[in-house]
Amino acid sequence: NAGVTQTPKFQVLKTGQSMTLQCAQDMNHEYMSWYRQDPGMGLRLIHYSVGAGITDQGEVPNGYNVSRSTTEDFPLRLLSAAPSQTSVYFCASSYSGQGITGELFFGEGSRLTVL
Amino acid sequence: SQQGEEDPQALSIQEGENATMNCSYKTSINNLQWYRQNSGRGLVHLILIRSNEREKHSGRLRVTLDTSKKSSSLLITASRAADTASYFCATDGYSTLTFGKGTMLLVSP
């Protein structure tokens, strides 16, 4: 049972490049979310999804896109990378029975540097 | 905007001592959760306390919740070096889970 898997673990981009951070979970969780973690800022919610085909914005959605075509996968797309998007990104999922605010299971993070 | 805010920002203790960290929040919540993050790793859920509960235990962890003061505390008893980590509170405001900035705990042998 792998839990929540994020790829890549590390990535360096140049300003203006685009990329997709992958997130997959094998626990049949309905709820999935993306957070970014910056020093001194804690974790901030970017986007979340309560089920396949349903997504919504969090606190800091600008510059990011998401889609949820399957229960298992929730990719995060950076459209045109900026140095301000240098951060550690975490994907998390939750049991559907607990709703969107139950216990979150986190991936190990994707560390992104934008030059 | 951040909902929960932990205090202190950093805490340094010796093995065997107790560690207490606090979380304050601003608006009504459905539940409050505590997470641990080891350096370079993802967050791990520790405990969830609902708004109608006042105290909850899990092993060496004790969490209290005072909704009138909009605050919670996490007590780790008999700390071990392996407890060295950052600890975050997260509040459920009936929509999404919002995390505080965390308390860094250092437990020295």
Image: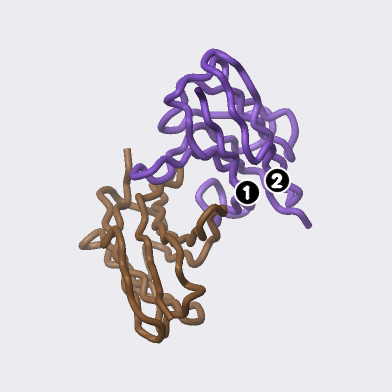
Name the residue: 45% across, 69% down.
Answer: B84
Q: Earlier in the sequence, mark 1 or mark 2?
A: 2
Rounded to the nearest whole Å, what is the CA distance between mark 1 and mark 2?
A: 6 Å
Indicate which disc residue A93 carries: none
Name the residue: 41% across, 57% down.
Answer: B88
Q: Chain of mark 2?
A: A
Question: Which image quarter holds the N terminus of chain A?
Answer: bottom right
Query: Seen in the image, is A33 located left or right of residue A86?
Result: right
A6 shown above or below B55:
above
Where residue B11 appears, as percent x and y from the top left, is 31, 67
Dot 1 and dot 2 residues touching (CB under 8 Å): yes
Query: Seen in the image, is A24 located left or right of residue B23?
Result: right
Element class at badge 2: strand
Count the numbered circles shown.
2
Where residue A82 appears, as percent x and y from the top left, is 47, 19
- The residue indicated by pointer 1 is A107
Name the residue: 41% across, 83% down.
Answer: B15
Q: Residue furthest right?
A: A1
Where residue B33 appears, as percent x and y from the top left, is 44, 60
For label 2, count other residues whose C-alpha is less than 10 Å away and answer few (under 14), some (14-19) or many (20+).
Answer: many
Co-location on one chain, circles 1 and 2: yes
What amino acid does circle 1 point to?
Answer: Gly
Element class at badge 1: loop
A53 shown above or below A92:
above
Task: State which chain is coloured brown.
Answer: B
Name the residue: 50% across, 77% down.
Answer: B58
Query: Seen in the image, is A23 located left or right of residue B22?
Result: right
What amino acid does circle 2 point to?
Answer: Thr
- The residue indicated by pointer 2 is A5
In the rendered image of the structure, the colour used to display chain A is purple
Q: Nearer the viewer, residue A111 or A30?
A: A111
